[in-house]
């Protein structure tokens, strides 16, 4: 899903907290085939760009966005 589609789902469900996990298409493909070609994420964005776009889409909502520690550096602004 794109960040905006994901944010729309969160807005519809209205949770108090959302825990973000991210599926990196290239890394997942290379688990079974080390020579797998580069695969883009939805919208052609990097992981950091998708996380920032998602957080931005929810900044005026009453929902806390929580990122695991492994996202801290790339999503930092």
Image (cartoon, rainbow, N blue to C red):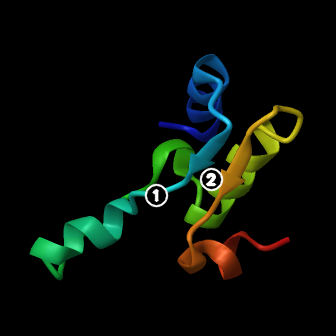
**Is 9 displayed left or right of 31 in the figure?**
right
Decide if residue 33 is on the left or right side of residue 28.
left
* Quadrant of res 18: top right
Residue at the limit of the structure toward the right, as seen here: 60
Which of the two marks, 1 or 2, is nearer to us in this view? 1
In the drawing, what numbered circle is on residue 14? none
Secondary structure of the residue carrying numbered label 2: helix
Q: Which residue occupies the foreground of this view, 70 or 14?
A: 14
Mark 1 to mark 2: distance in Å? 9 Å
Give how far across and how far down residue 16 sits, in percent. Answer: 68, 37
Q: In the rendered view, would you say 23 is above or below 43?
A: below
**Which quadrant: the C terminus?**
bottom right
Report the front residue among 57 and 43. Answer: 57
Q: Which residue is drawn at 47% across and 36% down?
A: 1
- At horizontal 12% and vertical 75% (from top left) the residue drawn is 33
Residue wearing tag 1: 22
Q: Which residue is outermost to the front? A: 16
Q: Position of residue 45 (x, y in %)?
A: 59, 54
Determine which residue is flagged by label 2.
50
> Residue at (22%, 66%) from the top-left corner?
29
Residue furthest left as drawn: 32
Q: Which residue is drawn at 56% across and 25% down?
A: 9
Report helix, strand or loop for mark 1.
loop
Please report contact status of discs 1 and 2: CB closer than 8 Å, yes or no. Answer: yes
What is the x, y in percent for residue 59? 85, 41
Q: In this view, does 46 lie to the left or right of 29?
A: right
């Amino acid at each position: 899903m794109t960040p905006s589609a994901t944010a729309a789902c969160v807005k519809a469900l209205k949770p108090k907290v959302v825990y973000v996990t991210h599926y990196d298409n290239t890394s997942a493909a290379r688990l079974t085939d080390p020579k797998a070609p580069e695969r883009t994420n939805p919208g052609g964005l990097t992981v950091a760009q998708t996380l920032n776009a998602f957080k931005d889409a929810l900044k005026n909502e009453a929902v806390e966005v929580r990122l695991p520690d492994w996202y801290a550096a790339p999503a930092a602004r």
